[in-house]
Amino acid sequence: MVGELLYAFRIMRLPLLDAGGQPIGKINDIIVVPSRGNDAPKVLGFVATSQRRRIFVSASRVGTLNNSGAQLKSWDINITPFRTRAGEQLLGKDILDKRVGDEIVSDIALVHKTGKSSTWQIAKVRLSKRGLLNTRSGHRLVDWQEVSQLFAPKTAIAAEAARLRDMHPSDVATIIRSLPPEQRRQLADAMDDERLADVLEELPEDEQLRLIEGLDMERLKSVFDEMEYDDLADLLGQMGVDQRTKVLDAMDDEDAETMRQLLSYPAGTAGALMTPDIIVLGPDATVADALAQIRDPERLVSIAAQVFVAHAPHYPPTGTYLGVVHFQRLLRERPSMTLKQCFENEPTIDPLLPERQVAERLASYNMLAVGVCDTNGRLLGAVTVDDVLDNALPADWRRKIVSHHPSGHDIGHPVNEVHNETP
């Protein structure tokens, strides 16, 4: 479905709002990247000023964008200073006021598209002519395709990054694994943080280390912020002690403490497999509250399949664990029902339970995720079926995937050009 047009010139004067609607900064510019084929360029994110810093705000973190401002979905914000990467363009800096024949680009219209994924795309470009006294005397609104050269990738590496951007991360990982080390690093540098994090999660740990080799600590921290906790713990576990210590010291105190806790569990146990990033609500929360949580498209399917119920605090380690409500049950009950009226007291597991027994527990109870509790009955996290399956397969299973994309796309010409351009 296509929404109404929203103009870049207006957006770049809007406030950045936190999840509660309070101003925390100001939007300065809009970052766009090319899409595959004939698809319109899409908005990757925004440059904003907050706490006297120019920062990057991913479009996926923005819940609403309208004439009131750009409101974040959550309270989290990454204050790492912004920097552009290969293939990215800033509408204000790079496109607006650019000349096209005897006209200039005076504005760009964005449209919100929903479907499998929600995204903002470029729809129209406003072209203006200047009068004799250097004033704009007329304008016309054209489809973006009419001036597509404005948004074309400027380098081979940018073109290849655009080609891979909309593929499934596992397919991108397969392609990257077939490239020489230098081309891998160039593509990694051209990817945005979320995309690189997704791809890292699909690679064996030793190849993850090779891909991020050479990235500075600031970039590493930004990428690691986007990774799932359990996948990040696996990656950190493969690092040398000195490198791991540097990474943990650079992380936020709360995240670093979470990672140290996960790393403290022996390999092959539930604790080493679990993620603390689960949905936990109190017994007095309603079915409507729970449904709002599982609707979040950023959540993994296995995590959004159930809501755990526990006494406060509602982030691991929680208060006393009470039970779980599966999404099918939530769909059957009235929105006003409280979770204490519909949760099931499913068994949990100990963090030191061997992974084979974790798999047996999931299979026996037909679960997508099983809660992990300490000896005091506090919920520490959950082990999901996808992580159990990942560990149940041979260690080299990712290396056996055929090195081409199932849709028929090859590595192709752009990568060879990237290699030729390398000094």
Image: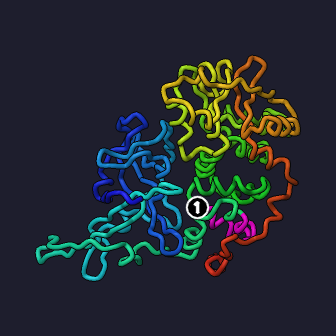
| Residue at x 46% of width, y 52% of height | 59
Q: Is residue 383 left or right of residue 83?
A: right
- Location of the N terminus by quadrant is bottom left
Residue 199, percent from left and from top: 67, 57
In the rendered view, tell whether residue 172 sits above or below residue 13.
below
The kind of secondary structure element at disc 1 is: loop
Residue 124, percent from left and from top: 33, 68
- Location of the C terminus by quadrant is bottom right
Q: Is residue 263 left or right of residue 132?
A: right
| Residue at x 74% of width, y 34% of height | 370
| Residue at x 86% of width, y 38% of height | 360
Q: How many marks?
A: 1
Asked whether the viewer can see residue 255, the reply is no
Q: Nearer the viewer, residue 414 or 419?
A: 414
Residue 266, percent from left and from top: 85, 35
Q: Is residue 388 left or right of residue 156?
A: right
**Residue 178 shown in magenta:** yes
Asked whether the viewer can see residue 320, the reply is yes
Location of mark 1 (residue): 191
Residue 62, percent from left and from top: 44, 47
- Magenta: main secondary structure equals helix
Q: Nearer the viewer, residue 387 or 272?
A: 387
Colour mapping used in the image: rainbow
Q: Nearer the viewer, residue 293 or 62?
A: 293
Q: Nearer the viewer, residue 270 or 94?
A: 270
| Three-letter amino acid code of the residue under disc 1 | Met
In the rendered view, tell whether residue 155 sits above or below residue 304.
below
Which portion, as a residue range, is magenta? Answer: 174-190
Q: Quadrant of residue 241?
A: top right
Q: Quadrant of residue 90?
A: bottom left
